[in-house]
Amino acid sequence: MVNANVGQGTIVFGVDPSGSVSGIEPGNLDKAQRTLSQAITDNFDQPLSPEIWTETVEGKPVIHISAKRLRTVPYHEYAGRAWTRQGSENRQLTLSEKDHLRKCRDRSNYPGPWKCDRCGAVVGQLISMKRTDEGIEKTYNCNCGGQFWPAT
Ligand SMILES: [Zn+2]
């Protein structure tokens, strides 16, 4: 879900796909939370920092995991592979899809068009670039105070 264009999502453990609440066995709740948190820490590259919390639904405990991809991250990999959610299926991203995401989600390599995250203005090219001792410095600031991001 974080690799899809929406860039965020929530997973609830203890609810089956039809929506009926089975819950997590209360004795296993802490262990399940720790195991999920550790699996996320160990396997995501770049690191993902989800919110994890428990809630009681229909009298049964469930675990929520909510995560969001930072706009500076083109995609996350889990255990060395990048996945995306398509409908109700998980699918591995192809090399060309990963190349595409790197190009269109990485501001330093994106050719345009750009869209302001505040006023919605669309521009074909960045407002300014200047040469510094460290290389080309690009400006992503819009006149309204917002910032330009790839318009995808
Ligand atoms: Zn603007």
Image (cartoon, rainbow, N blue to C red):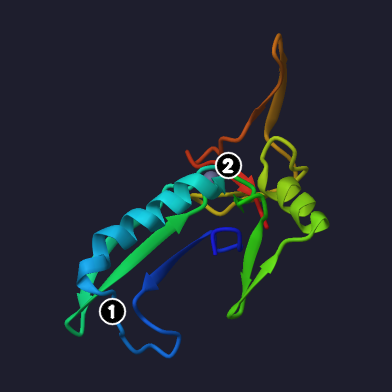
Element under disc 1: loop
Observer-side mark, 2 or 1, equals 1
Q: Residue at x 75, y 46 (%)?
A: 103
Where's residue 60, x and y in %?
21, 80
How far across and down, in percent of the image, does residue 133 sit?
71, 9
Quadrant in which the N terminus appears? bottom right
User: In the rendered view, would you say 5 is above or below 79?
Assistant: below
Marks 2/1 in contact by CB < 8 Å: the verdict is no
Disc 2 from disc 1: Cα separation:
36 Å
Give the residue drawn at x 26%, y 66%.
Answer: 28
Helix, strand or loop at disc 2?
A: loop
- Residue 120 horizontal side relative to residue 134, left or right: left
Question: Viewed as shown, does residue 69 lie left or right of 89?
Answer: left
Along the line of sight, the residue nearer the viewer: 79 or 72 = 79
Relative depth, front residue between 144 and 100 = 100
Residue denoted by label 1: 23
- Residue drawn at x 34%, y 77% as measured from the top left: 14
The residue that appears at 38% across and 52% down in the rendered structure is 37
Q: Is residue 119 above or below residue 141?
A: below
Say whether residue 41 is visible. yes
